[in-house]
Image (cartoon, rainbow, N blue to C red):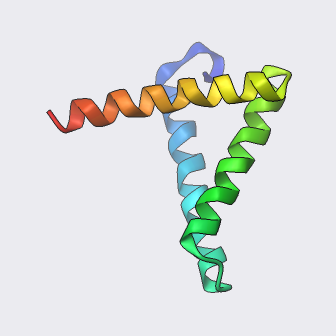
Amino acid sequence: MTGNDEDLSMEAIEKVRTLGRSLAAKAQSYGVSYEDITIGLGYAAFDLASDLAGSRRGGVEWLRGVLDVIEQQVRIETH
């Protein structure tokens, strides 16, 4: 989290999501499939998580935690 400030962190996360979607649109304009873009961005997230965690195994666990948070939000939205 950005400086333990949840509001600031959420704002930063949304900015990064916007940049990722912009990058995906740019890649699509070059003929890259949405599937390949999604996989590539997934690997990029893994690379960053691995750096953050200090190991590739830690990166996988870190991403599992991220996906758990996303899943919880989706469950709340669908109930």
Left or right placement of residue 55 versus residue 49 in this view: right
Q: Which residue occupies 44% across, 26% down?
A: 69
Vertical position of residue 32 compared to residue 42: above or below: below
Determine whether 29 is above or below 20 in the image: below
- Asked whether 26 or 32 is in front, the reply is 32
Residue furthest to the top: 4
Furthest residue in direction left, as rendered: 79
x, y percent for residue 40: 70, 58
Q: Where residue 71 sits: x, y (%)?
A: 38, 32
Residue 58 falls left or right of residue 67: right
Q: Which quadrant is home to the C terminus?
A: top left
Residue 4 drawn at (x, y percent): 59, 14
Q: Say which residue appears at 49% left-offset and 21% top-offset.
A: 6
Position of 64 with respect to 74 (left or right) is right
The mark total stands at 0
Q: Residue at x 33, y 31 (%)?
A: 73
Q: Nearer the viewer, residue 29 or 9?
A: 29
Query: For this view, does 70 lie left or right of residue 40?
Result: left
Q: Quadrant of residue 58?
A: top right
Where residue 75 sits: x, y (%)? 26, 32
Question: Which residue is at 63% across, 76% downward?
Answer: 26
Q: Quadrant of residue 5?
A: top right
In terms of depth relative to the viewer, which is nearer, 66 or 13? 66
Q: Quadrant of the N terminus?
A: top right
Compared to residue 18, the image places residue 29 above or below, namely below
Indicate the quadrant where residue 77 lies. top left
